[in-house]
């Protein structure tokens, strides 16, 4: 029953977000277009519910010649690719706002495991162990408030599995509240190879 309620909440929140934030979305779209060549929206193949592939949208924060199928933290020198406006977008997580459309369409949820890249076989395999691939990926999730980019893959997948086991309205509300704090302080953002 909760999954139907969750989907209804996702549609309502995504709709409200797209309408209320439309001036912000327009300003960010213009800022990206005016400060670097290329489209404002970047789409990337990601793993969705039951390991289906979908196109996840973001505001483009990197140059158009950036390798698109490599996680940013695995690039040799990610700062060489990130645009000036892109640093702000990534630090503030505003680059994620176009995913409200993915949520509205049903590719994603407000809360759930962050969608893996289509070629992140290690993360997908770990999530299989915990059952976390059976639910829609989210705009934010338990792993995002527990360490974000700083977490090794087995630990991240374990948090995704914990969310899968405990998911509910109250748990989602707790994660959303913690997400606000994480975003405000920029916690757990890492732009480079782990040592």
Image (cartoon, rainbow, N blue to C red):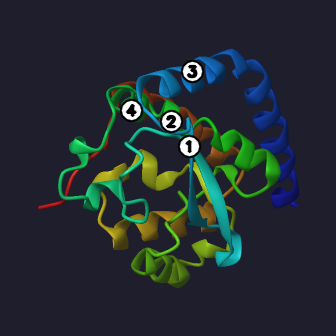
Q: Disc 1 and disc 2: Cα gap in Å?
A: 5 Å
Callout 2 secondary element: helix
Q: Label 4 crowding class (10 Å Cα cut-off): few <14, some 14-19, many 20+?
A: many
Q: Nearer the viewer, mark 3 or mark 1?
A: 3
Mark 1 lies on residue:
58
Residue at the image position 79 percent from the left and 55 percent from the top? 106
Q: Is residue 69 above or below residue 191?
A: below
Q: Residue at x 50, y 77 (%)?
A: 124
Which x, y percent locates residue 168?
Answer: 71, 53
Closer-to-camera residue (152/45)? 45
| Dot 4 or dot 2, earlier in sequence | 4
Q: Earlier in the sequence, mark 1 or mark 2?
A: 1
Name the residue furthest front: 37
Disc on the earlier residue, 3 or 1:
3
The residue beneath circle 3 is 30
Q: Dots 1 and 2: beta carbons under 8 Å?
A: yes
Q: Tell me which numbered mark, 1 or 4, is placed earlier along the sequence.
A: 1
Task: Find residue 56 and report its horizontal and vertical position in percent.
Answer: 61, 54
Mark 1 and mark 4: Cα distance apart in space: 11 Å
Residue position for label 2: 95
User: Looking at the picture, does residue 19 appear above or below residue 12?
Assistant: above
Q: Residue at x 33, y 54 (%)?
A: 72
């Amino acid at each position: 029953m909760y999954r139907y309620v969750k989907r209804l909440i996702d549609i309502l929140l995504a709709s409200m977000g797209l309408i209320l934030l439309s001036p912000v979305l327009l300003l960010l779209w213009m800022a990206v277009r005016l400060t670097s060549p290329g489209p404002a929206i970047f789409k990337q193949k990601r793993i969705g519910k039951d390991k289906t592939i979908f196109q996840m949208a973001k505001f483009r924060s990197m140059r158009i010649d950036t390798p698109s199928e490599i996680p940013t933290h695995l690039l040799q020198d990610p700062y060489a690719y990130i645009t000036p406006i892109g640093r702000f977008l990534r630090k503030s997580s505003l680059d994620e706002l176009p995913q409200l459309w993915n949520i509205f369409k049903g590719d994603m949820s407000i809360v759930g495991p962050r969608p893996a890249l289509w070629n992140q076989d290690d993360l997908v395999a770990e999530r299989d162990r915990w059952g976390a691939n059976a639910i829609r990926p989210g705009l934010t999730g338990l792993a995002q408030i527990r360490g974000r980019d700083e977490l090794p893959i087995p630990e991240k997948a374990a948090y995704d599995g914990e969310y899968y086991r405990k998911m509910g309205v109250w748990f989602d509300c707790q994660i959303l509240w913690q997400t606000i704090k994480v975003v405000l302080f920029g916690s757990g953002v890492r732009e480079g190879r782990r040592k």
